[in-house]
Amino acid sequence: MIDENRLKILTDGAKYDVSCSSSGSKRKNTADGLGNAAFAGICHSFAADGRCISLLKILMSNDCVFDCKYCPNRRSADVPRASLTPEEICELTVGFYRRNYIEGLFLSSAVVRNPDYTMELLYKTVLLLRTVYKFNGYIHLKGIPHADKLLTQKAANLVDRMSYNVELPSEESLKLLAPQKTKKSIFTPMGELTAGRAQYLAERKKGGGRVEMKGLGRYLPAGQTTQMIVGASPETDGKILRLTQAMYRKFDLKRVYYSSYIPVVQDPLLPDKTAGLLREHRLYQADWLLRFYGFTSEEILPEDENLPTEYDPKCAWALKNMQFFPVEVNKASVEELLRVPGIGAKGAYKIVSARKHATLTFEHLQKMRIVLKRAKHFITCAGKFFGSDDPETVKFRLMLAERTDSAEQLNLFDQGLLPPADAEKFLLRSTPQNALAVLTGQL
């Protein structure tokens, strides 16, 4: 019987890991199994900042032999310790699924005894879930650095997604704040998973799609992800984005997640205040530009700089490159349209499709829900331009547009009437516009 105290400790210990999106799996179900990891089988529920909360998110144990300075479960921390057995996690997962609380599992663990021992327990858990409990549902497993390659590969044949968290953007910061971890201990298994998936896909193509392990499905059908903590170490956004870009290219990651540092533990080597949600938000916007808009990290900002707080990264790039604007929406390529602030990926393709049938005007763009308060400074429609030619005026209006996106019903006592020293107050209010931007990433 799992007591409530252990459950509280282990679910609370897992909350700092944000790399738990449950999308993208196409694992084949077994006829006599329980659950479904396909798109329709996952109940996507989102928090205010867009994070998926549809999974049981839990640690197997928080009794860690590592002593990472930023971690509340580090060896030297004076916190209550708890552990669950593989069988207890299986019973918990299936019990919660039957009650319709969850549609999948996000399973991680502190390093108990040593990496191999911990990874073996994690592997045993997912093996039991798939073979004994017949659980078809989504499973995201956190890999353990330094663990044996064979254990990692065997686990990858059972789960939908795996992740090894980079945590800190440089080797120097890892040595200082997480001395038991190295870049090699994280990047090596990430590379092995990438190679394993490539081999699986090649064999599957050669064998006509019949290389799945019988009853167990595909090799990492939802790929792998990672996470970086922002603000615990001095690396700039430029350096973080260059590392992000390199990992996307080398490891074919589905996502890189960013977690704003929160001072939950006290240590002289750590900052005494949070990095703030706005910085995290800007990194996600820049990440979207890397993945879907054809930008490189070098274009977005220099390596030694942070992203601006006043407006999003695409606006910042456009202001630095006014020589490319305005573009004529009736003639511009998709690539050119994607670089216009206020035109997202969907909007760009709508424009290209619609202009085959008629010459587009600003009224047409408004009906397509193009954000004209941004875009009008960078486009012409049938030769007409309604923006401003003055760069300083454009900059001011983009800042104003960012603020009005977060507008609320105002009153005499609204602190938001004052020019904010911290733009976060304006940008991260819970409004429909902000919620949509978080979920879609449209810039």
Image (cartoon, rainbow, N blue to C red):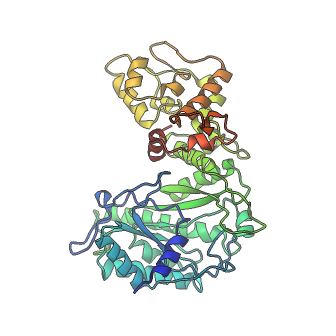
Residue at the right extreme of this rendering: 268
Depth check, front residue: 63 or 226: 63
Q: Would residue 256 appear left or right of 55 to someone viewing this image?
A: right
Residue 13 seen from this side: yes
> Up-down: is 424 above or below 332?
below
Question: Quadrant location of residue 21?
Answer: bottom left
Image quadrant containing the N terminus? bottom left
> Up-down: is 286 above or below 136?
above
Residue at the top extreme of this rendering: 383
Q: Would residue 291 appear left or right of 229 to someone viewing this image?
A: left
Depth check, front residue: 281 or 262: 262
Residue 138 at x, y = what percent?
A: 36, 67
Task: Give the residue drawn at x 31%, y 80%.
Answer: 131
> Up-down: is 48 above or below 9?
above
Q: Would residue 179 appear left or right of 151 to someone viewing this image?
A: right
Residue 64 at x, y = what percent?
A: 61, 80
Q: Would residue 408 appear left or right of 126 to someone viewing this image?
A: right
Task: Give the residue drawn at x 55%, y 23%.
Answer: 378
Residue 218 seen from this side: no
Residue at the left extreme of this rendering: 31
> Up-down: is 61 above or below 309?
below
Depth check, front residue: 343 or 12: 12
Task: Give the residue drawn at x 64%, y 70%.
Answer: 71
